[in-house]
């Protein structure tokens, strides 16, 4: 057994626990060491039995003079013991732990930790932590700062502590320092070995803090190096034919003139940045970050138009079929007049080609897909079956929904196509640079002129009926259209959530909006049904769309002006902002009503911030402070790594790490141990996506 041994192969005990450990992210032996405690129980006060005080949290050591199981009623049992040292004797009691007398025997030397109680004029320890002391062993569950870990069923902190202690004892000799001396010295970090020992078994909280600082540095440092590495790999490729811009300037200008609006300044700036990339010999790898409604689609369309003019195909990938459909419509509308053929490919719809070129004999659909100028779709667009003739540009919309590793596939697809990724996840710049240090960044930091902010109100329980009346009035008087979001936050909708949405839908239809036209949209519908429902809504056939949060991503229906969100306390501020972004997409005044039954002042305050803050990035920062990074950046499946020790809100550490990483990159060969570690980490990350 060594640090790299997979849990399943690490002996019979571990094998039995493998699936449970996997839930905690422990897949191989070394993962135990990175399963760091989230707090410590302080049992470091060791007292003689004669000196214990009521209410004190102490550790006592002594000899067991008596221990027994006592059965009370059926299924209930007590374990009673007495432990003595030279100063006195103390009573111990456990509840329903009949195995304790099997572990602790009369005559054993034990160490017990817990809170002292006074019972009938005598000190007593109830359900203390316990361990039998052997001559040479140091206590790990008592008499010290004791690490408390994230647990899962059948895997307790005590069990983890024992395994981790054993692994450290056996393996520490094989662990090597890999951070270059110069960095260690300059940053004042402690060594790797002591960091691992001290994060689990610190002598003091200060020691634990130092260990945490070191491991947090490592974690971000490798993220940063990996990003720099990906960047250099990507940039090592060459584009066959850099795009020409000057040659096609006239056509681009025509296109811009034809738009029903003028580009915002930040759209113009982003287009310029993208064009510069496209004209260079290195493939573009750019992230376009812009708040909901900031107009990313048109920017991507201009880039795809330039690709077309240069004789290249583009692929546009969206995370959902609904969105792919919407983009197909928008982009066809924008580009068809200029002779561009646009096709759609999703999992369920094989193909849909909008062509004004009327190529002769488009019988073979694969042929038409392969030869279309722009192919829009879900991840199906990257399937092996399509061999692009001349792929020059790949656009990924809502990139946070896809994995980072998609890029590897793309590189193999075409001959080094340019890549533009887009996201509305308002990641603070520092964080973006760490996570996506391999990308160049463009920001759309203004929304189109004429947009009004979405008036937002938190609606308490007692105002619910009034709110419904107000909405009815808006529909009747102003022809407003309304989204009602049912409160299901699961990423993948289950049948239970769909059922609940249906129930709410029926209730609203019967009891609240009996005169209005309602439809229900949820994730379990067939793609075709979803499209019909959305089309009906878009064309104004329906007044109210009751939906699960699947509408969160990207849907653009400018005539909808009211967004009602049920149980809003269940969402993060960023998510709510995304949902709110579904309205306010025209020059009409729009409204967002946040329903909550919560009475918790903190929750209310958190939600109320949406009434006054309308900038996604500010809300994201607030989320970060109030709920922690996991909530915003999603899970590892979404291409954002889960941090075990560090935090994305630690901006100063991120800056420090970035500086150090950039200083030594790319001359890593000087540091073979570092290089080896980087490779082993990257290898893990590339695997499943
Ligand atoms: P997002 O950035 O959220 O993807 P979209 O690209 O869907 O936003 O654009 C939102 C809406 O704004 C669309 O209806 C689009 O036509 C419109 N739009 C985009 N740019 C402008 C602009 N410069 N002026 C006015 N409207 C714009
Ligand atoms: Mg969009």
Image (spheres, grey):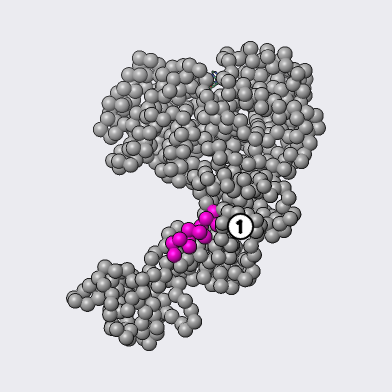
| Circle 1 SS class | helix
Q: How many marks can you see? A: 1
For the point 67% across and 27% down, which residue is it?
A: 274
Q: Residues within 10 Å of mark 1 (few under 14, many from 20)?
A: few
Q: Which of 505 and 473 is in front in this view?
A: 473
Identity of the residue furthest to the front in this view: 186
Left or right, residue 537 beside residue 341? left
For the point 32% across and 86% down, which residue is it?
A: 86
Which region is colored magenta? Answer: 204-216
Q: Which of 61 and 32 is in front in this view?
A: 61
Left or right, residue 472 beside residue 133? left
Q: Which of 138 and 109 is in front in this view?
A: 138
Residue at image mark 1:
185
Judge whether 108 appears above or below 678 on screen.
below
Q: Quadrant of residue 51?
A: bottom left
Q: Where is residue 293 in the image (x, y as percent from the top left)?
A: 52, 25
The overriding secondary structure of the stretch rendered in magenta is helix
Q: Which of 688 and 677 is in front in this view?
A: 677
Magenta span contains residue 209:
yes
Q: Where is residue 277 in the image (x, y as percent from the top left)?
A: 71, 30
For the point 56% across and 72% down, which residue is it?
A: 169
Residue 101 visible to an observer of this rendering: no
Residue 207 visible to an observer of this rendering: yes
């Amino acid at each position: 057994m060594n640090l790299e041994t997979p849990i399943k192969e690490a002996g019979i005990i571990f094998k039995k626990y493998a699936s449970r450990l996997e839930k905690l992210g422990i897949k191989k032996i070394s993962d135990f060491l990175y399963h760091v405690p989230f707090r410590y129980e302080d049992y470091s006060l060791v007292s003689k039995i004669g000196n214990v005080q009521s209410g004190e949290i102490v550790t006592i050591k002594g000899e067991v003079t008596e221990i027994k199981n006592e059965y009370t009623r059926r299924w209930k049992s007590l374990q009673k013991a007495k432990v003595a040292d030279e100063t006195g004797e103390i009573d111990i009691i456990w509840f329903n732990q009949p195995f304790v007398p099997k572990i602790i025997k009369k005559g054993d030397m034990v160490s017990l930790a817990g809170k002292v109680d006074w019972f009938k004029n005598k000190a007593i320890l109830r359900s203390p932590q316990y361990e039998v002391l052997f001559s040479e062993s140091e206590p790990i569950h008592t008499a010290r700062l004791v690490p408390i870990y994230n647990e899962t069923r059948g895997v307790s902190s005590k069990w983890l502590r024992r395994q981790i202690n054993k692994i450290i004892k056996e393996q520490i000799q094989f662990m090597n320092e890999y951070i270059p001396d110069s960095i260690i010295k300059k940053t004042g970090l402690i060594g790797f070995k002591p960091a691992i020992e001290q994060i689990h078994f610190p002598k003091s909280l200060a020691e634990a803090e130092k260990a945490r600082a070191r491991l947090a540095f490592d974690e971000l440092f490798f993220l940063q190096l990996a990003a720099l590495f990906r960047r250099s790999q990507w940039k090592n490729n060459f584009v066959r034919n850099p795009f020409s811009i000057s040659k096609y300037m006239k056509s681009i200008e025509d296109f811009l003139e034809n738009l029903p609006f003028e580009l915002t300044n930040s759209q113009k700036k982003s287009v310029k940045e993208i064009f510069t990339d496209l004209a260079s010999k290195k493939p573009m790898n750019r992230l376009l970050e812009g708040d909901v409604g900031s107009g990313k689609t048109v920017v991507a369309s201009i880039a795809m138009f330039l690709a077309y003019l240069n004789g290249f195909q583009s692929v546009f990938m969206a995370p959902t079929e609904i969105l792919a459909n919407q983009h197909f419509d928008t982009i066809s509308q924008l580009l068809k007049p200029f002779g561009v053929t646009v096709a759609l490919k999703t999992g369920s719809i094989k193909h849909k080609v909008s062509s004004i070129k009327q190529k002769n004999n488009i019988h073979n659909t694969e042929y038409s897909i392969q030869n279309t100028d722009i192919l829009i779709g879900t991840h199906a667009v990257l399937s092996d079956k399509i061999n692009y003739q001349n792929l020059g540009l790949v656009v990924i919309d809502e990139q946070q929904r896809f994995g980072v590793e998609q890029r590897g596939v793309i590189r193999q697809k075409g001959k080094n196509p340019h890549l533009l990724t887009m996201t509305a996840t308002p990641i603070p710049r520092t964080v973006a640079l760490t996570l996506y240090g391999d990308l160049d960044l463009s920001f759309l930091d203004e929304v189109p002129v004429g947009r009004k902010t979405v008036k937002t109100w938190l609606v308490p329980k007692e105002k619910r009926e009034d709110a419904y009346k107000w909405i009815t009035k808006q529909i009747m008087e102003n022809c407003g259209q309304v989204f009602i979001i049912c409160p299901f936050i699961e990423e993948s909708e289950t049948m239970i959530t769909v059922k609940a949405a249906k129930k709410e839908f029926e209730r609203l239809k019967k009891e609240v909006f009996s005169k209005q036209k309602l439809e229900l949209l949820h994730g379990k519908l067939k793609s075709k049904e979803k499209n019909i429902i959305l089309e009906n809504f878009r064309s104004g056939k329906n007044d109210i769309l009751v939906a699960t949060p699947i509408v969160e991503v990207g849907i653009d229906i400018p005539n909808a002006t009211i967004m009602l969100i049920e149980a809003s306390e269940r969402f993060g501020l960023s998510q709510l902002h995304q949902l709110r972004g579904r309205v306010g997409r025209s020059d009409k005044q729009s409204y967002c009503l946040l329903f909550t039954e919560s009475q918790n002042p903190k929750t209310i305050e958190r939600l109320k911030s949406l009434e006054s803050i309308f900038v996604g990035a500010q809300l994201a920062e607030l989320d970060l402070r109030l709920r922690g990074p996991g909530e915003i950046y999603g899970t590892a499946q979404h291409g954002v790594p889960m941090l075990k020790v560090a935090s994305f809100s630690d901006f100063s550490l991120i800056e420090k790490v970035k500086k150090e990483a950039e200083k030594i990159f790319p001359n890593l060969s000087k540091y073979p141990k570092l290089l080896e570690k980087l490779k082993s980490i990257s290898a893990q990350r590339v695997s499943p996506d």
